[in-house]
Amino acid sequence: MKQYHFYFKDKHSFKKDLTIFKEKTGNKQVIFQVFSEVLYTDEVDAARSVIDKVFPDAPYIGASTGGTLINCECAKPISVVALVFESQTTRAEVREYDISVDSLENIAEKIVKFTNENLWIKSIELYYPVPKQSTTNFCALMSKIRPEVQITGAVTCSMDITSDACALFTSESKNKSSSTLMAVAYYGGDDLNVSSYCVQGWQPLGRVFKVTKAEKSVIYELDGTPACDIYKKYLNVEGDENFFFNTLEFPLYVMCNNVPVLRTPLSANPDGSITTSSDFEIGDEVRISYGDPVTIVNSITRDSKRLEEFGPEVMHIFSCIGRKKYWSTKEATYEIAPIAPISNSSGFFSLGEFLRSNGSLVQHNVTIVISAMREGDKNTTKKKTNVDKIYSNTKRSLASRLATFIGVTSAELQETNRKLAQAAITDGLTGLYNRKEIQKLIENEIENHNGNFTLIMLDIDNFKSVNDTYGHKSGDDVIIALSEILKDTAKNCGFNAAVGRWGGEEFMMLVCNSDTTSSKVIAEKIRDQFGKTKFDSIPSQTVSVGVAKFTENEGIDSVCSRVDNALYKAKAEGKNKVITA
């Protein structure tokens, strides 16, 4: 597998270059990539017409870009890359799908069907137009593709990243470039080996926010606050026409299928919401993230070593244009310099990146995705990169250190708040809910679930004599022992149940969607198990239990009074028994 590249100057010279190139390649299969930093130009159409004429049977795939990459360096405005296969078994096909006439769901199903029916396919590359809607469903459907198939790709764009303009085309296209085409390249064959990689380096910054209101790809509120206001408060980013540009370096950090994913807000809306390229659900946790130079360096260093181990002959690189903006004081290709010696490469700066991880296709932002390919055995002819030399001047900035400080202190504060919140609703000795919380749960059940529940109230028999005779330490051991039985019962009783310490040696269990008979069986098991519990320095203990089913139109005071009366009836009738109200 070999890569060649050409820069389009004019139709005549390009045709001459391709004609000479064809004489060298003979009958070997070739696939072309055409990258343009300008939209809808006669030059791009001219380059395509030359390819069609000189290589009429060769597939090609092309797009407008936010900057073209050839061998990890910025290339000329119109660049053409030729990938030549040395093995007769290696092949490539290109197909296009028009999202203006077909739904994303149908397109995904077509790609899945074609891939799963053609077992020669080992890798798919997507050239995706600027999304007008969420890519979540498309990615979910694409995950039906055979698990061994690698999927990479990018959202195409233009040099003006504030614009949603883009242009895509393939050898299937007979018309001019289109902003509604999805171009797909399929690679495969017995001798083809493919491996894909993801480079991020962005770190979560500060506190965790919970999505409290969202509809598909629109986040309305984070922690009850308009999502735009979060960016305004913490980063002083206004929700205006420059919102997308100003938030590129501060994407949302989320976990998707156990993979960290960066999501750049696409726009701010008048109602204070933000639109993203993927769906969010209420309860999702997100954090604003920040590009840390040292973490980026460590990430690319790690992956350059993995690439060296794979030994590719060609790499296709899709790097988010947000990273280009991030390294504005350095060369745009600064961070990918370490992988340049590994093999020839081509690609472009994109608006979003696709990568299949853990079987699921995910769209990323502010990420580098690399598809590495080789035919046959590992390529060992390329020089290894000297990462230390390339990154010798990369120092951790003051902003980076402050970001680390904020992250650590935020984590510590969140942990403290978590512990305080937990302490406010739990009993310190037993770890069960305290009376206030279990009472709140009962009230919620009455108000929100029509009161279909049963209460089980328990009181340790003769507990005062335990404290008086054996000491409070032994009394605590008895309380803890019963608490552990109650925890285990609530977890495994087959109902949605909660339990709390009602006070002293009294306990209350809420058993939802249960009747009196079922709850009495649960209560008898607790009584029996506690009675068989052995203690080190005191004899076995017993517990009396009351059970009451909530009845329609009664309040919490009434049902609690009835279960309390049942409990004390059990006490009056000799203790160590269960009585139902």
Image (cartoon, rainbow, N blue to C red):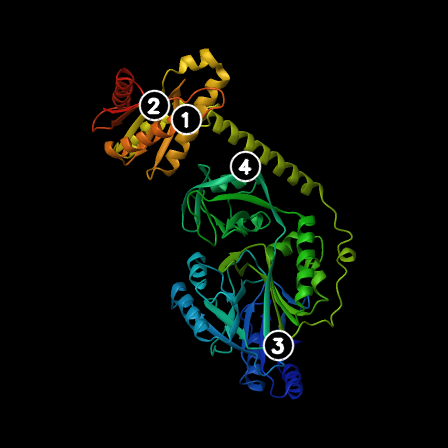
Residue 402 x %, y %: 67, 38
- Relative depth, front residue between 466 and 404: 466
Which badge, 2 or 4, is on the more N-terminal residue? 4
In the rendered structure, which amino acid carries the disc numbered 1?
Leu
In the rendered structure, which amino acid carries the disc numbered 3?
Leu
* Quadrant of the drawing holding the C terminus: top left
* Quadrant of the drawing holding the N terminus: bottom right
* Residue 107 location, quadrant: bottom left
State if disc 3 and disc 4 touch (CB < 8 Å).
Answer: no
Which badge, 3 or 2, is on the more N-terminal residue? 3
Which residue corresponds to mark 1? 482
Disc assigned to residue 323: none
Residue 416 x %, y %: 55, 30
Which residue corresponds to mark 3? 83
In the rendered structure, which amino acid carries the disc numbered 2?
Leu
Which badge, 4 or 3, is on the more N-terminal residue? 3
Give the CA separation, mark 4 to mark 3. Answer: 49 Å
Mark 1 vs mark 3, foreground winner is: 1
Mark 2 vs mark 4, foreground winner is: 2
Mark 3 residue crowding within 10 angstroms, few (<14) / some (14–19) / many (20+): some
Mark 1 residue crowding within 10 angstroms, few (<14) / some (14–19) / many (20+): many
Mark 3 vs mark 2, foreground winner is: 2
- Identify which residue is drawn at 42% across, 24% down: 434
